[in-house]
Amino acid sequence: MFQPPLPQLPPEDAVLTDGVLRSSRFGDIYFSTDGGLAETQHVFINGTRLSDRLATGEPLIIAETGFGTGLNFLAVCAEVLRTNSKSKIDYISVEGCPPSKEVVAQALSGFSELVDLCNDLLQQWPRRWLGVHHLSFLNGQIDLHLHYGQAEQVLPTLDFSADIWFMDGFSPAKNPDLWSGQICQQIARLSAHQASLATFTVAAAVRTALAQAGFTVQKAAGFGRKRDMLTASYDKGFAHAKAVSPCSVLVIGGGIAGCAVAGSLQALGAEVTILDAADQPGAGASGNPAGIVVPFLTVGDMISSRLSISCLADTRKFLDAYQLILSDGVVSLDHDDRKTSRQKKLAEQGFPVDLAVYKDAAELSALTGLPLSRSGLYFETGAVIRPQQFAQHLAASVPRLYGAKLVSVSGQAGDWLAQCEDGRRFTADHLVFCSGADLPSLLQLVNQDLGPYQVTSGQLSDLPSTTSLAPSRIALNYSGYLTPVIEGRQYLGAGFDPTGDTAVTAAGHLHNLELMPSELRDLAGDPAAWRGRTSRRLAYPDRLPLAGPLMPGVSVVSALGARGLTLASLIGKSVARQITGHVPPLPYQIMSGLNPQRFFEKKL
């Protein structure tokens, strides 16, 4: 079935001239030359009565069209500090043409009162990749969900109830798409009861569109040379669900998935314990000595591609922060039997060069240090890491109990009792099953069946550093993968055994050898000298993860597959925020695609 290509962001168009930041595409300025911060304070902070909301200490959802330089966001952070508010804030913003970090740094340099907040924002400034970028500020008090993409495409994929809306962006005369009736209808859909809205424009078309969407609109005194501005209130809608943390959660499974969701839950104030059936860390796939972080891109606009890009951005940020990268960059190669280069088709979609760039065989040979005879994509933000080290950092301070093999579960949401084989008993408000290949049998403890799964095994081959593959400088990804030499060993993976057998076999090593590009097989040495490790995997027909609520009081994060190291962090955050009543960073459209009940829903 034909899929249109994944839309890409337009070229950057922000130009700083004589201290004024302008869009060359729209011919408009980013903020007032009379005082950008003062305008933001007047129009958005005062226009939505933000200080009154902050005084309650209640959680807030603030949404915005047009992030730009982030000046409105910084003003909100400053207001939180000024008022000493305890409110937890989700700030959700959409930006269609993000300016570069360098341009933003220059544009914000004049706001000395925001210097510390500016530095924090610039330090976290996202890569210019389509999708969501989740950033945290003021020690986790404010979460920024920054969606890069066109508002008319992004807003329909989201699901939240905002208390406050900042309608910003270039003027309706310059950029009418951002102020359309369709946009106003989406803003109304995403508004809580008694939401307040403010915008600098009083254009008749905008007033009409907001009124038709259900807002009560009125003019107010404008800023500077602008006589008027608009404020609006929304008396329809529903109050958004209040966050329920702290709550107690048992995470069943101590691999990458379990650690990702457990660490995120703890950061949100939940009381979390990991129950690991293994006797020691790293018993499953998370115990592999090395693994690659790389996106799964598709020829066409598919959930798996959007998910992968957003997750890679989040994971790379985490890995850089904790210095967990063993080797930078991954090359994804074409297959022997491909008549048409899949990697070239992917490159033709116009991905940013810091995400994926197409290179021919000669370029890749020079880059990798190996004699390659095929083209491929180079992912400069791909990486080789130690999975167990990654898992430990994701849940560094979460209590973890080993040998905790679950044998019975009773109770209901808010009152679960879990018992282990050795007699240990635990109570919790919520259960999260993250147990990989053991998931189907464990879910029977809560009378759940997830349908058409497949349990397979994958054998990793552990090579000495004396083979002719040792000159490899960058990880290769094909039907399997090959890492560079890491602390005297090189790793080749990962086989696919549909029986799920966990024995390390000579046949498994030969299979890994056969997966390699044909021009490299003779360089791999004698498989009889290889060591190995095998772990089991869980997969579903659509090869997407399971992530989200399964039943009241029970969630699942599992079946992350070969891209588990790439996907775990952001998926874990999203499920943790679902459980605790916060806004998940991943769009509702993507989370629906990962719904653990999706196969039953299709049948119905």
Image: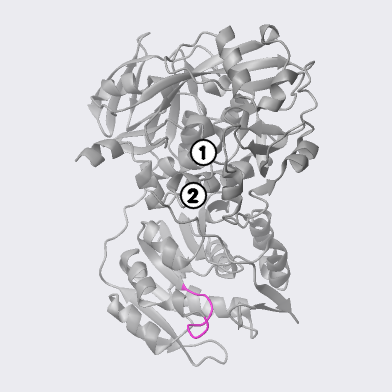
Residue 54 in view of the camera: no
Q: Is residue 430 visible?
A: yes
Q: In this view, does 511 lie to the left or right of 482?
A: left
Q: Report which quarter residue 4 is drawn in.
A: bottom left
Q: Please state the extent of the stretch shown in magenta in the rendering.
A: 167-174
Q: Is residue 520 left or right of residue 261?
A: right
- Tell me which residue sits at (39%, 46%) in the image: 591
Quick one: label 1 or label 2, which is nearer the N terminus? 2
Alpha-carbon neighbours of circle 2 within 10 Å: few (<14), some, or many (≥20)? many
Q: Is residue 186 left or right of residue 294?
A: left
Describe the element under mark 2 as helix, strand or loop.
helix
Name the residue: 51% across, 8% down: 503
> Is residue 2 within the magenta segment?
no
- Amino acid bearing label 1: Leu
- Image quarter (top left, top right, bottom left or bottom right) of the C terminus: top left
Q: Where is residue 486 in the image (x, y as percent from the top left)?
A: 74, 24
Residue 122 position, x and y percent, is 67, 58
Amino acid type, mark 2: Arg
| Gap between marks 1 and 2 measured at Cα | 11 Å
In the rendering, at what x and y percent does residue 597 appear? 29, 37
Q: Main secondary structure of the magenta part?
A: loop
Q: Mark 1 points at which residue?
A: 567
Q: Residue 170 appears in which quarter of the rendering?
A: bottom right
Image: 165 above or below 84: below
Q: In this view, does 550 lie above or below 592?
A: above
Q: Which of 79 and 406 is in front in this view?
A: 406
Q: State the image coordinates of residue 258 (x, y, percent, origin top left).
A: 47, 29
Rendered residue at 49%/73% (across/down): 45
* Nearer to the camera, 351 or 341: 341
In the rendered image, which residue does mark 2 sit on?
Answer: 306
- For this orientation, the residue located farthest to the front is 339
Of the pair 481 and 113, the residue shown nearer to us: 481
